[in-house]
């Protein structure tokens, strides 16, 4: 088996990303050897570096079995578990973009009306106060001319 060129690896990655997504494609590519199977260690390679006793120091199947069993893995949530929480019909009860725009328009109209009412009330108050101050001043001025 010949080694795969970097161009071929890049093309493969691009196809994988388009097909299964970026995360899974990256995971898969991390599992694929860049230099092919020729670079895998053989029994002879291990014989050069380690004795059978040395290899027994590595983790065994029993060691891995201590971490998680099939029964442990069944405790995780499944697609069916998520389906219990919300259905498509439940999700349609949430506001859509159009609903928010309609709500925003109504809210703006209500705020404008409230603002106009408050401005009218404030204007009437200022006119009343100004009139209350101006009447005595006008009366005093009139008294000087007519009195």
Image (tube, rainbow, N blue to C red):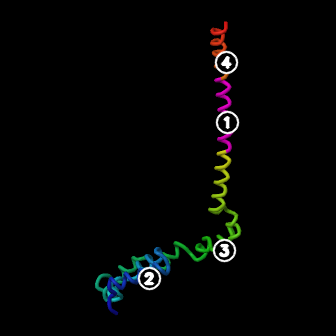
In front here: 88 or 48? 88
Which residue position is annotated with label 1?
Answer: 120
Q: Which quadrant of the view contains residue 13?
A: bottom left
- Residue 12, compared with residue 68, is above or below; it is below
Which residue position is annotated with label 2?
Answer: 15
Neighbour tally class for label 4: few under 14, some 14-19, many 20 plus, Cα within 10 Å: few
The answer to if 126 sits in the magenta stretch is yes
Mark closer to the observer (1, 4): 4
Mark closer to the observer (3, 2): 2
> Which span of residues is magenta-colored?
113-130
Q: Is residue 64 left or right of residue 33?
A: right
Q: CA distance from mark 1 to mark 2?
A: 67 Å
Q: Which quadrant of the view contains residue 113?
A: top right
Q: Secondary structure at mark 1?
A: helix
Q: Are marks 1 and 3 in contact (CB under 8 Å)?
A: no
Q: CA distance from mark 3 to mark 2?
A: 31 Å
Which residue position is annotated with label 4?
Answer: 135
Q: Earlier in the sequence, mark 2 or mark 4?
A: 2
Q: Quadrant of the N terminus?
A: bottom left
Q: Secondary structure at mark 3?
A: helix
Which residue position is annotated with label 3?
Answer: 80
């Amino acid at each position: 088996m010949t080694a795969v060129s970097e161009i071929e690896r890049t093309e493969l990655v691009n196809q994988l990303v388009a097909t299964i997504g970026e995360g899974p494609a990256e995971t898969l590519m991390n599992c694929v050897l860049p230099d092919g199977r020729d670079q895998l260690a053989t029994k002879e390679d291990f014989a050069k570096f380690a004795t059978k006793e040395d290899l027994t120091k590595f983790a065994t199947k029993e060691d891995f079995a201590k971490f998680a069993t099939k029964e442990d893995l069944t405790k995780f949530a499944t697609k069916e578990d998520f389906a219990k929480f919300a259905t498509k019909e439940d999700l349609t009860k949430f506001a859509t973009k159009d609903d928010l725009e309609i709500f925003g328009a109504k809210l703006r109209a209500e705020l404008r009306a409230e603002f106009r009412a408050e401005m009218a009330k404030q204007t009437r108050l200022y006119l009343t106060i100004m009139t209350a101050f101006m009447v005595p001043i006008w009366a005093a001025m009139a008294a000087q001319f007519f009195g």
